[in-house]
Amino acid sequence: MIGLRPKAKILSYRYLGTLQSTAGSRDVSKADQLRILNANTKFVTCPIYYATSSPHIGHIHSSVIGDFYHRWNKINDVASKFSLGTDEHGQKIIRSAAQQGYDHPEILVNNISDLYRRTFKKFSISVASLDDAIFMRTTTSEHHQAAQKLWTRLRSKGFIKMQNYEGCAVNGHKLEWVSEENYIFEFEPFLNEIESWIVKAVAPDAAKILIDELKDRRKTGNMSLSISRPRNRVPWGVAVPNDANHTMYVWFEALINYLTAAGYGKHDNNALEFWPPQLQVIGIDIARFHCIFWPAMLLAAELPLPKKVFVHGHWTRDGMKMSKSLDNFVTPKELLELVGNQSDAVRWFCLKHATLKNVDFQDELLRIQSDADLANKIANLLSRTTSKNLNPSGAYPTLFPDSLLNAPDGEKYLIETVQGLPELYASFVNAGQLPNAMNCVIRAIEEGLQFMTNEKIFKLDRDILSERMKKDSGDDDEL
């Protein structure tokens, strides 16, 4: 009888070369004053989610992908840090707090932040209670310090300047034309380097979208970003250093949360605890900020760029975009109720659909895929191979490298499949092809089930089965 669980820590960590490529990032040597205190620690990040309302499937989706890669590091015995959290500043927070009857925005963001933590725990997503996970909040003093530190650095290098800004601003549900003085971040000097980085750090389908945007910006001359707002209009946010009249634009300072998580605010100018991120997980809607503005900020500060960016698509529901106005978001509660509160079923479902393509959510889709993959295949094979009739000792036979030599013809194909599974799985994971990784596991499970049917395993004599299990596991009655 062949072993169905090969010895493997998914082979070795050598396959992470894909995720660990330099990706065009600026070498630390170019900023030789920088010290990385834990250079061997890998850093996986998820977005920080805007704290105006409750979590939905999109937040769970990003967080599950990030948590998967964080766990992937750990099972391969690689030190890993993982960050996610809540974005808690800006005019929308002020407005949302007032609409919900809160006396101060801080009350709202405290409640929403706590809700996210509790939700993440329900889906087994690593949160701040673990030593290797960091739950970021932009209202902390550490984040304010980090944001102001980076601002000061960029301004001292001449990349931040005061300029009159004209454009549309949202006031309630209305667009209003405004003309006011804002601080501007110039990122034109970094466009070529950003484009080279995108090609290496982002999957081709998403990279094309981003490079097309860079081309449009070059054509239109739109190569700067307004990064402050008058404090009398937006008082809830990080204050601009040495200017009491301005608040940092929420998107600018929110991106700095990744540096905050790495200790940028609490160490001197020469140190980060770990950097750069091995992988940043984002939705396509925030790709512009993370793949154009964010690398420009890092390059201006002479900090290394993220190694890889995992860009995924969005969920629709019954063919329609999810939105507050339609009130059709899929809530965490709905997800769990659909699968009998089995969070692993939701996690599996999210990983199966971790692509740039948008996915139309339907209740039956989650149920059907969960039952088909987890219950009818994985659990079914596990139940069969560990049953008392088939495997009275409950042992998992070791799959030895020479198992093919003496295997009957009917077993050879399955042995080859199982032997090659760790390497195949690892190659897909490290290439960012999570649906393929999940599917190759299912194909191996299907081969195992088909083998048991073809060989009529349950009709074999129990003593013969036990003897073959003992033989395949390498056990011997003699010392």
Image (spheres, rainbow, N blue to C red):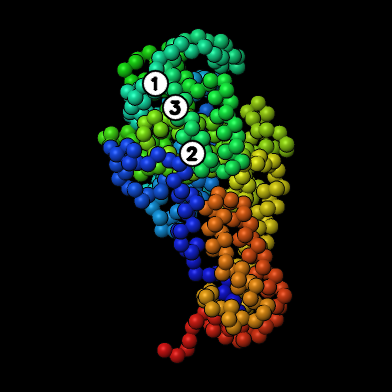
- The amino acid at mark 2 is Trp
Left or right, residue 466 beside residue 227: right
Q: Which residue is mark 3?
A: 189
Residue 468: give x, y in percent of width and height.
58, 83
- SS type, badge 1: strand
Residue 404: give x, y in percent of width and height.
59, 78
Q: Which residue is mark 1?
A: 160
Crowd around label 2: few <14 · some 14–19 · many ≥20 (10 Å): many
In three-dimensional space, the C-alpha distance between marks 2 and 3, rounded to whole angstroms, equals: 14 Å
Quadrant containing the C terminus is bottom left
In three-dimensional space, the C-alpha distance between marks 2 and 1, rounded to whole angstroms, equals: 23 Å
Q: Which residue is mark 2?
A: 197
Instruction: Spot the residue most to the bottom.
Output: 478
Answer with mark 3 or mark 1, whichever residue precedes in sequence.
Answer: 1
Evaluate if marks 3 and 1 touch, with contact meaning CB atoms under 8 Å apart.
no
Evaluate if marks 2 and 1 touch, with contact meaning CB atoms under 8 Å apart.
no
- The amino acid at mark 1 is Ile
Residue found 32% across the figure and 43% down from its top = 36
